[in-house]
Image (cartoon, rainbow, N blue to C red):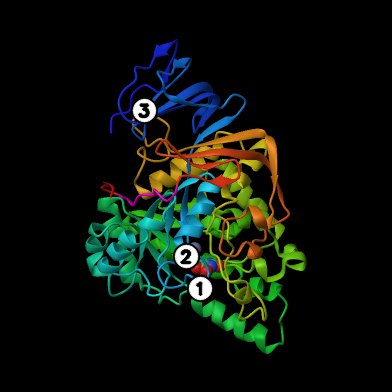
Amino acid sequence: MRIEPLIYRGVRRIRRVSGSEILVRGGRVLTGWGMVEADVLVREGRVAAVGTALEPGGTRVLDASGMLVLPGAIDEHVHSREPGMTWKEDFSTMTRAAAAGGVTTVADMPNTSPPVDSPERVAAKGRDVAPRANVDYAIFAALTDSNAPRIDELVRAGAIGLKAYMGPTTGGLEPPDDWSVALALRFSRTTGIPVFFHAENGPLIEGLSGELRGAGRSDPAAHSEARPPVAEEVEVARIAAIAGAMGGNAVIAHVSSAGALELIERSRGALRAEACAHHLIFTTEDYAARGLLIKVNPPVRTREHVEALWRGVRSGLIRTIASDHAPHAPEEKEGDVWSAASGIPGVQTLLPFAVDAALRGLIRVEDVPRLLSENPARNLGIYPRKGSLAPGSDGDMVVIDPRGSWRVREDDLFYKHPEVSPYVGMEFRGRIKYTLLRGEIVYEDGGVAGGPRGRWVTRGGVR
Ligand code: DOR
Ligand code: ZN
């Protein structure tokens, strides 16, 4: 794609052309390189111009004065629960929540029922969810020992990347062995396909869980003790060794511990780090008030780990922040610490959380589009079509009022089960006013608009 100069200065008369146009006028446009007061014109779904004093020619105008205008967020790690687990969530509820949260592209994970682990299942899922997609979507395939020798077929079927579950979690997928990981990373080196890793070690977790359970532990914090930092470090070290030899685009998903982050730093670029909002917010002290609502894999950790993660976000070592939106039904989140489901829904609060962090000075404002739009698009191989507001990019945008704020109520959340959100009651500075998908309003002031028009995003283009 050709990138035109980003900013036109001076009046530029926009000639009316056939087809749809929308002008987002007078906002503070925020991209990874900084902020500028400008108008953004979207024509036929793509950014046509970013500049000052663009004059509309019969174009629809959204007044963004005093507002922040960002590229739509790309949540590179969500679980819609399709196919087969739709009592927890479905594509419609998840993507409505995404639109309301300023997320215009989601990348959906494969630990479903059945798992998305074959070319046929990738193709079927990409096709089947389309009528329920309120935002654009990409599809991950699970890496398994049986599909590792024919990854090219998964990609040809439309997979945006691979997900390797190295330890036990929802879906019960078997971890791929070292050879399968090597094959995936070798393939990744030549094609750029990302391989995302859930890095936790099964034998350590099973051994420790057995001991803690045997000792009669039943409090929520036992979950964090059963999955200590060393369980993450062991897998990150192994993946670092294989990635160091094979190359490729290896992403450690939801990094949660200081030690894992150090290993990623020492890998000198062989590994990329993704953090999740909940690991930057909650600590083991929050079990007291929130109980099993914050049971998640990897688990929430102590304050020192959370601080190390924030340092990683600020230094750029952590390249992306995702939600790992992983909803369950309320009855699945109750009961025994050992049997309750792991996972936190969060696609709707991801961008509000990051904007709030910027408005509070925890990160710079321009870090928000870098962490939530540009780098996720790069990870997925869809930049600058997505994750950018340069002319030629898709017109995916969020308009946020920084003077407003949002205290999260169950009623505001579009999830199938808003009651399992541990974010209810929390207050975020900034308020999402509009979300635009390829130039069309999909969310406005509390309401999802326009019906499902999301498209399947693959490496080859939008299907
Ligand atoms: O807590 C988690 N829940 N961690 C995962 O890795 C998977 C997720 C889920 O799918 O429920
Ligand atoms: Zn996940």
Tell me the number on the disc at residue 180: none
- Residue type at mark 3: give it: Pro
Secondary structure mainly formed by the magenta segment: loop
Q: Residue at x 30, y 68 (%)?
A: 121
The earlier-in-sequence mark between 2 and 1 is 1
Relative depth, front residue between 412 and 338: 412
Q: In the image shown, does 422 or 242 lie closer to the viewer?
A: 422
**For mark 3, what is the residue?**
391
Specify start and end residues of the magenta stretch as a single range: 451-458
Within 10 Å of disc 2 (Cα), the crowding (few <14, some 14-19, many 20+) is many
As drawn, the residue found furthest toward the bottom would be 214
Labels 2 and 3: the sequence-earlier one: 2
For label 2, the residue is 198
Instruction: Find the distance from the CA under tag 1 to the CA under tag 3.
Output: 41 Å
Q: Is mark 1 within 8 Å of ligand 1?
A: yes
**Which element is circle 3 on?**
loop
Q: Is the residue 174 above or below the residue 396 in the image?
A: below
The residue under label 1 is 169
The type of residue carrying mark 1 is Thr
Contact flag, marks 2 and 1 (Cβ < 8 Å): yes
Mark whose residue sits in front, 2 or 1: 1
Which residue occupies the extreme right position in the image? 288
